[in-house]
């Protein structure tokens, strides 16, 4: 090995330094040009070590000079998102878009991705964790920009850097060295709105007393009866086909949902949401009545082969937000509180609990991903069941 021509020099401040000028790193495999550079250090040994490091890195990089990418983080993030949305459901796509636009791009979008360091990321994650741990004073919902998901934000950034590595824009992922703070996060106050058994009785009595020989009244009666009997989500109801209803076995099969209120997605909200639900005889009779009424309606329009259970009167997928006024009118007529279509799902859970169903059965009917989710959401609704169980104890332990 030839002796390296390392020279001593002085900085403007008068400090002693060493330099190896025109150090040959290797020949670029793409251009055939010799790659040379100046290497400086405080010591001769430091120069030698840096020289060896640069030669090894050059060889590791395929004997080509690495060019620093001037791509903005936002450009790489959009490239990542364009691939992400091809493989995900609409709800996940909306959530990712919101995370990028609200948290990640405002923080790093205008920076060159090659210049984003672990230190920058660490500072931002600490800021996000402070926001996440700030008191929310019992609020039911966090304000936009005050997310508790600071770990998720870092995870998304890390995935964008992995995408950048695959494109050859950066060599390493600075997220890997970030220390994620552990902070205590106040939970939002979840309020479960539901109808009591008495309110439901009043509602359905009112609906059935009406002279239901028009599309709107028949539609609402059938929809609400199915919602309370099954606990399915309103989006799942709007995506139902008649082939999903088994009149002989009194079951409803859930395998789809609507997204953006009017598009049918050929898979439900989660994997656990794929399920078949048994419904009561009154509900199945109501659905059979609605089937005949609907068929007669579409026969008049020359379209008797309607496959949707709850379409518009013209046969297209219904945007269920259009039904809100019809529900309000029905609630007012019945003299009960004004809630929402989702309240029928909560009401179904309450009826199931207080009728004596186990939480495992209720979980399967509702399509929750875990049993704990069902317990956490609805255990406080079992007052009636507790009273029955206490009565059973008192009768048994009468000594």
Image: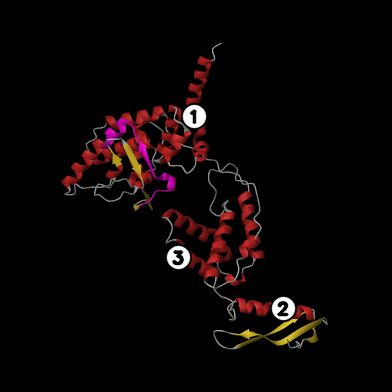
| Residue ID at (58%, 59%) | 154
User: Which numbered disc flags the more N-terminal residue, 3 or 1?
Assistant: 3
- Nearer to us of marks 1 and 2 is 2
Residue 399 position in % (x across, y down): 56, 11
How many marks on residues?
3
Q: Are marks 1 and 2 in contact (CB under 8 Å)?
A: no
Residue 328 can be seen in this image: no
The residue labelled by disc 1 is 382
Query: For the residues marked 3 and 2, what is the alpha-carbon distance in whole angstroms?
Result: 40 Å
Image position of 257 (left or right of 160): left
The residue labelled by disc 3 is 82
- Nearer to us of marks 3 and 2 is 2
Front residue of 44 and 132? 44
User: Which segment is the magenta one?
Assistant: 265-287
Query: For the residues marked 1 and 2, what is the alpha-carbon distance in whole angstroms?
Result: 70 Å
Crowd rating for badge 3 (residues with CA inside 10 Å; few <14, some 14–19, many 20+): few
The residue labelled by disc 2 is 50
Query: Disc 3 on helix, strand or loop?
Result: helix
Report if residue 266 lies within the magenta region.
yes
Residue 227 position in % (x across, y down): 36, 38
Q: Are marks 3 and 1 in contact (CB under 8 Å)?
A: no
Q: Specify the quadrant of the image occupied by residue 240.
A: top left
Image position of 374 (left or right of 282): right
Front residue of 395 and 191? 395
Report if residue 273 lies within the magenta region.
yes
């Amino acid at each position: 090995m030839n002796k390296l021509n390392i020279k001593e020099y002085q900085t403007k401040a008068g400090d002693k330094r060493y330099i190896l000028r025109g150090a040959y790193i290797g020949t670029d495999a793409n251009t055939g040009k010799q790659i040379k550079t100046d290497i400086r250090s405080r010591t001769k040994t430091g120069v030698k070590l840096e020289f060896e490091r640069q030669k090894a890195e050059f060889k590791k990089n395929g004997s080509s000079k690495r060019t620093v990418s001037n791509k903005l983080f936002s450009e790489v993030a959009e490239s990542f998102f364009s691939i992400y949305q091809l493989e995900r459901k609409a709800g996940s796509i909306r959530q990712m878009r919101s995370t990028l636009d609200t948290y990640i791009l405002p923080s790093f979008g205008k920076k060159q991705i090659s210049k984003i360091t672990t230190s920058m990321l660490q500072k931002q994650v600490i800021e996000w964790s402070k926001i996440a741990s700030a008191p929310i004073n019992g609020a039911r919902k966090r304000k936009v920009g005050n997310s508790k998901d600071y770990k998720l934000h870092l995870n998304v950034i890390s995935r964008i850097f992995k995408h950048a590595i695959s494109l050859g824009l950066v060599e390493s992922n600075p997220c890997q060295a970030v220390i994620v703070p552990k902070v205590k996060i106040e939970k939002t106050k979840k309020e479960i709105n539901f109808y009591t058994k008495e309110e439901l009785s009043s509602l359905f009595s009112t609906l059935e007393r009406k002279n239901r020989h028009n599309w709107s009244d028949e539609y609402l009666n059938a929809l609400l009866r199915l919602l309370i009997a099954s606990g399915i989500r309103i989006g799942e109801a709007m995506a139902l086909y008649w082939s999903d209803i088994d009149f002989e076995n009194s079951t409803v099969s859930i395998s789809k949902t609507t997204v953006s209120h009017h598009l049918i997605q050929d898979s439900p909200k989660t994997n656990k949401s794929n399920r078949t639900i048994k419904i009561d005889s009154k509900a199945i009779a109501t659905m059979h009545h609605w089937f005949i009424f609907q068929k007669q309606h579409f026969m008049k329009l020359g379209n008797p082969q309607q496959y949707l259970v709850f379409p518009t009167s013209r046969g297209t997928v219904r945007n269920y937000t259009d039904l809100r006024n019809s529900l309000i009118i029905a609630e007012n007529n019945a003299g009960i509180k004004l809630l929402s279509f989702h309240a029928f799902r909560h009401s179904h859970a309450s009826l199931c609990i207080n009728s004596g169903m186990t939480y495992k059965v209720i979980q399967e009917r509702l399509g929750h991903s875990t049993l704990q989710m069902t317990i956490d959401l609805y255990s406080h609704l079992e007052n009636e069941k507790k009273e029955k169980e206490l009565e059973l104890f008192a009768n048994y332990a009468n000594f």
